[in-house]
Image (cartoon, rainbow, N blue to C red):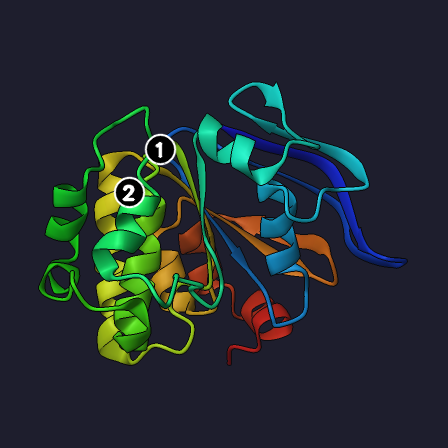
Amino acid sequence: MLELADVHTYYGESHVLQGITLGVGPSEVVTILGRNGMGKTTLMRSVIGFTPPRRGRVSFKGDDVTRWPSFRLVARGMALVPQGRRVFPSLTVKENLDVARHGRGGRWTLARVLELFPRLGERARNRANNLSGGEQQMLAIGRALMTNPDLLLMDEPTEGLAPLLVREVGRVLGELKREGLSILLVEQNLSLALSVADRVHILSRGQIVHSCGPGELRSNEEVKSRYLGVA
């Protein structure tokens, strides 16, 4: 589904990603973990085309998409739930979802998204700037699903959320995994990340320093302490 091969991404002369190689298979959830400032969001920006790599290759569904603009990647079947939600504040919930509707159709319709997020159905006529942070996060996920993606990129979906809403995001991730959606997930909440992941990569200073299955990481106290600050 997605393959990164020796990806190097810069901001000016700052060398942020330093040779990232990873893949996401069909119906697979791959989680990226790491402390703040280690390059996780830059990785997402490199995949979706906001900050294209200077070296290396990004492949999606067999195409070399390293230099593709983001709108073309979305049309090909990639979607992003960005860090910080970034919903359209002056539009209603329904308008935010409608604007993302993809012409090719698919299983994710307005009715289906509102079924997944009943709270959004109750708030369908409210402007996005009147929603709580948790409701805005639901809306950001729903908006991405409205494009009917084959690959969903999620950048810190539980950031700033109360524990009850973190569990709600976890429920949604579990449902999307059961649906067979491929997901590349950047997440700070270790428990949630490991509960949905098929594979885990830890990023430190722009490099993948550890890769394993979720069960192995749960029991590896040394790696969690060294790279994640988890005692």
* Residue 173 appears anywhere in the view: no
Residue at x 31% of width, y 61% of height = 91
- Residue 9: x and y in percent read 77, 48
Residue at x 32% of width, y 27% of height = 103
- Asked if the residue under mark 1 is in contact with the one under mark 2, i.e. CB atoms within 8 Å, the reply is yes
Q: Nearer the viewer, residue 111 or 98?
A: 98
- The tag on residue 111 is none
In 3D space, how far apart are the residues under numbered discs 2 and 1 (Cα atoms)? 7 Å
Residue at x 67% of width, y 70% of height = 37
Q: Amino acid at mark 2?
A: Lys
In this image, 127 relative to 66: left or right? Answer: left
Residue to which mark 2 is pinned? 177
- Residue 178: x and y in percent read 22, 40
Farthest residue, direction right = 13
- Residue 144: x and y in percent read 36, 47
- Residue 52: x and y in percent read 71, 42
Q: Nearer the viewer, residue 66 or 111?
A: 111
Q: Residues within 10 Å of mark 2 (few under 14, many from 20)?
A: some
Residue 170: quadrant of the picture: bottom left
Residue at x 81% of width, y 41% of height = 54
Relative vertical location of residue 53 with respect to residue 209 in this rendering, above or below: above
In this image, 39 relative to 146: left or right? Answer: right
- The tag on residue 27 is 1
In this image, 7 relative to 146: left or right? Answer: right
Farthest residue, direction top = 62
Q: Residues within 10 Å of mark 1 (few under 14, many from 20)?
A: some
Residue 160: quadrant of the picture: bottom left
Q: Amino acid at mark 1?
A: Ser
Relative vertical location of residue 201 with respect to residue 61 in this rendering, above or below: below
Which element carries disc 2, helix, strand or loop? helix
